[in-house]
Image (cartoon, rainbow, N blue to C red):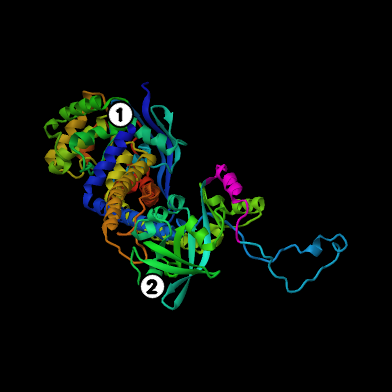
Amino acid sequence: MEKSILECIKINKYFYDPVKIQVLKEVDISIKKSEFVSITGKSGCGKSTLLYILSTMDTDYEGKLLIDGVEMKGKKEQELASVRNEKIGFVFQFHYLLNEFSVIKNVMLPGLKLAKLSEKEVEANAYEKLKILGIESKALKKPNQLSGGQKQRVAIARALINNPIIIMGDEPTGNLDKKNSEIVFNIFKELAEVYHQSLLIVTHDNEFAARTHRIIEMEDGRVITPKA
Amino acid sequence: MKFKLIASVSKSLLLARWKQTLVAAIGVTFSITMFIGLLSFMSGLNDLLDGLVVNRTPHIRLYNEILPSKKQPIDKSVDYNTSYNFIRSIKPKNKLLEIYNNAAVIKTLQSDNRVLGIAPKIIAQVFYNVGTIDLTGIINGIDVEEENRLFLFKDYVVEGNYIDLKNTPNSIVLGKGVAEKMLTNIGDIIQITTSKGERLQLKVVGFFQSGLQDIDKVQSYTSIATAQKLLGESNSYITDIQIKLKDIVLAPALAKEYAALFELDAIDIQTANSQFETGSSVRTLISYAVGITLLIVAGFGIYNILNMMIYEKMDSIAILKATGFSGGDVNKIFITIALSIGIFGGLLGLIFGFGLSALIDQIPFNTAALPTVKTYPINYNPKFYMVGGIFSIITTYFAGYLPSRKASKIDPVIIIRGK
């Protein structure tokens, strides 16, 4: 059996405000390399909460989380930040590009933070990623000069810059029209199938989910689809 | 590499709100400018006022005080040395004001390497004769060259040439106040009477103005030789030895030492003029307090602007954190922003502060009391610039500290999910 790149075992999560509510109940998930997985479910079922735990940004949970075989629990904030930097790429519903920087600089930022390559090499990589996404001509523009779909593609390029082991998306097509959603979906599909990139996408768009390799359906904090 | 990245992120955040940033920097600039201007001016004024006294006062003065002997003959008697001896109506002994063996004393002092210089002096009580009226006065017989070297005599001779006092026999530099009363001009001959009744005619070669009216109304200067002639004394006669030290702080200790060594009375400048030192230190304190208050106010400005920036840039901070910037990195970004405001504003402030000082230095300031001063006094002490620079960095650091910490604690989940 192929090794899981992301695995969580018996994750429990509580919200305390205003009263103690259990939002995640014994969630077990395992994702393998080059899998394109979607998490679906109704609003409030805990799918976003789960994603933030899996992304290491939320550390207040019970259970085990392994990324690339390494236990995340007990790591310091700074160590988690470098895990996110190196191993995880993010695409959110909103693009979250920094308007102060050009498109290319936005893509480069996580790469510069990682500082494994020189600035020149990071820049070359960033151009390459933009090319994959078909927006290299916009590299020197500011994000606020781009359309919504283009912005989201820049955000995907940014997620790819450090060649992460997994890309996580929180409703990445939620803000886009049909046409742009289609473009973004095709990009994801291409990344998974051509570049063997693992993807974990939270969505409530069932059509989108249906076309991924595997669907993890959640209800009331539990995974209801049997594990693959 | 890492610092370069943080600096570039800071720079773009700064430039994104460049107007606010500018306002914050101007706040720092203004306060540092005022701080430098105020301190330079205050300190210049202090030096001026202190100079009035300190430049003209010997650090230690050796002299003979006319006092009854502390040890009466009966105290030395073996028969009575266990008793209490009461003697009434003791009178001072006919001890002269002259310092005995003064050549040896001066020689000893000159070989002491803590001493900058020595100026002997004769103080004589006289009357200036104006028609039938006698004005009381004091004549100082001085060694003109040494007096000028150590106590800047030249600066206070407002008319005439001070060196004529040495070159012209029987000459006098009159106090301005005396001269006005006597209606004399330079070149006139005046007559004075000594306390022993001798009369002497002296040629006026200059006027002297110390800035202290009470002194100008009574004091005049002659050469030592003239003063000796006036008193009918030999050419070894002097009544005072004025000592200027290399380090003024040593004056009280050395005064005691010399008093014991030479068996003379000695008074140091700190004891004689303690009020001046108090005034100076209080003025300095006030200027520092005002300067620092200005800086703190500027610090609040920076604090506000950074706080606003953090609220505005919440999303950017969240995404930076999501993509791998740690809280520490975010903290550094905002501290860098605060410090660049501080350094930029502070540097401009130092330059403008220098400009302001130079400007004040040009403003005419004429007062009868201060003959040598033509413009407002300024002290260009590099210490103020250093203190100003350091303070601007410290205040901006603290102003940036809290907002930066807040920014570093932002939880990206809350921001991202909140959309």
Q: Position of residue A155 (x, y in %)?
A: 22, 37
Residue ID at (52%, 64%): B124
Residue A159 vs A15, above or below: the answer is: above
Q: Chain of mark 2?
A: B
Distance (Cα) linking label 1 and label 2: 101 Å
Q: Nearer the viewer, residue A133 or B170?
A: B170
Seen in the image, is B357 located left or right of residue B390? left
In the current view of this chain or complex, which residue is farthest to the right? B79
Q: Are marks 1 and 2 in contact (CB under 8 Å)?
A: no
Residue B383 disc label: none
In the current view of this chain or complex, which residue is farthest to the bottom? B132
Residue B182 disc label: 2
Q: Which residues are magenta?
A: B97-115
Identify the amino acid type marked 2: Met
Marks 1/2 same chain: no
Residue A110 vs B102, above or below: the answer is: above
Q: Position of residue A106 (x, y in %)?
A: 22, 36
Mark 1 falls on what kind of element? loop
Q: Chain of mark 1?
A: A
Q: Position of residue A152 (x, y in %)?
A: 19, 39
Residue ID at (39%, 70%): B177
Mark 2 falls on what kind of element? helix
Task: Residue A126: name its quadrant.
Answer: top left
Q: Assess whether residue A186 is covered by the magenta stretch.
A: no
